[in-house]
Every structure is written in C-alpha cells, then in structure tokens.
Image (cartoon, rainbow, N blue to C red):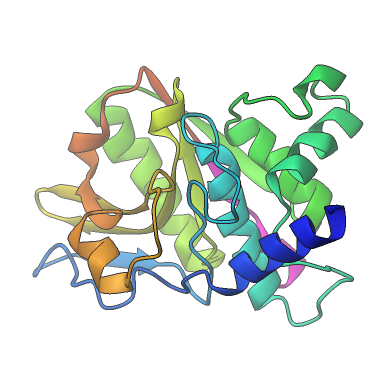
Amino acid sequence: SHVSERTKICQKVETLLKNVHSGLPDPLTDAAKCCLVKGDYLYFHYGCDGQDDRGWGCGYRTIQTMASWIYLNRSTVQNQTRIAPSLPQIQQALVTMGDKPGSFSGSREWIGTFEASLVLDYFCDVPCKVVHVRGGGAELEQVAVEELHQHFEKHGSPIMMGGDRDNSSKGILGVCTGDKGSYLLVVDPHYYGRQLEKTELQKRGWVAWKRVSSLDQSSFYNLCLPQTAAKGI
C-alpha cells in the first residue's frame, strides 16, 4: 500500500497549477518599480497532495512551492526524483539534521522561515538569507520592501514570509512600489478544496496583490530568500 500511496501523491502533484499569478493586473497604474518572480513554479496548498494539513501545514506548502521553482528552473536536474519534498520527508529531514526531536516526525507542528532555509539547503542545495523585520508598517515598508526588490531583481525566486503564528505564513512572488506605498504579490497556501482555475483563485484572492500596510497583524516578520543566483539558477 505504501507504493500506491506514493503513486497517488505523485499523480496529484502532476495536476498542480503552474504560475497562478499570471494574468493578474499590476496593482498600481503609475508604479515606480515592479519586480516579479522569473520562471515557472507550482502552486502548493493545503491538501493538494491528498494529505489534509489544515491548520498547520502552510509553511510546508510554501516551501514546496519554492522547491518547485528551483526544480523547474535548474538547467541540470540534480538527481531529484520529485519536484518538491512531501510533508513527511520535510519532517524527517528536520529530525535527521538535528533541528527537531524524533517526535516531530508524523506530528502536526507548523514550521517557519528558519526551517524553510534548512529544508531548501538540504533538499535543493540552495542557501537562503533569512531577514528579520519587526512588526509595524514602517519596518515592512522600508526594510522588507527594499530586500524584496533586490531579491527579485537578482534571484527571481519565490520567497517565504512568516510571522508569529501559522496563518501569517505565505509565499511572496513580487513587489510593486509607487508614491503611496508598496504592494506584495502574495500566494496563499491556505486554500483547501477541489482544484480551481487560475482565474478563480485570483478572483477569490488566493493569489493577489496586497498593500504592505494591510499585512501588519504580526508582531514580527521573517523573510526566507533563496540565494538561487549564487547556485547559477
């Protein structure tokens, strides 16, 4: 039954949507500067591979989205048997690395940007820069936005943004800055349900441009920025 379970998950992954942000209009008509993800990625979300991870799995799903970008944009596929590690594989890797106790494997514990950096290094051989930003609109507008512009210009890979609770974890696919502040292109892993068309996901706000000022519900934010250019990706 183990073989069929694995096959089932692989088949599910084959049906995942690619580049769910494409076709979204820019948030600002007179934007001074917009920088977006370059290249393909798959949209991973709650339950997308048959494992029901509602309430705890969003960090893992964002990591999977990031891993899929690395896999799809790497010119030489380095013995990767799948596009992204599964949730059990991510948990086992964190135990193997000594970051988590053995009881973590098979648990429903959520993970954040620090774990994301360990996991992407472990499975994809890509180092990550982790940036800590204090909560509050000003810090996000200044520190985070500048980091994001630099990241998308140089690396073009999706990033993970996390805070002090599970529901603040999300993927960021772009940043747009104008006179009246900045917007982030957020891909939200919390969607659960049957597969929706890209346009429907956009209509329902699962992938959307969000004002930076609207994100301020966390006491701090961390950004995990895969340093993919350093690896020639």
124 or 213: which is nearer to us? 124
Pick out the residue farthest to the front.
1
169 or 206: which is nearer to us? 206
Tell me the quadrant of the picture where the N terminus can be found. bottom right
**207 part of magenta stretch:** no
80 or 226: which is nearer to us? 80
Residue range highlighted in magenta: 223-233
Tell me the quadrant of the picture where the C terminus can be found. bottom right
Q: Residue at x 58, y 27 (%)?
A: 110
Q: Is residue 51 visible?
A: yes
Counting from the top left corner in percent of width and height, residue 230 is at 72, 62
Q: Residue at x 36, y 17 (%)?
A: 219
Image-based side of 209 in relation to 96, left or right: left
Tell me: residue 200, above or below residue 74: above
Tell me: residue 198, above or below residue 109: below
Tell me: residue 145, above or below residue 131: below
Answer with the quarter of the image where residue 107 lies.
Answer: top right
Counting from the top left corner in percent of width and height, residue 133 is at 43, 28
Q: Residue at x 45, y 68 (%)?
A: 37
**232 part of magenta stretch:** yes
Tally of numbered tags: 0
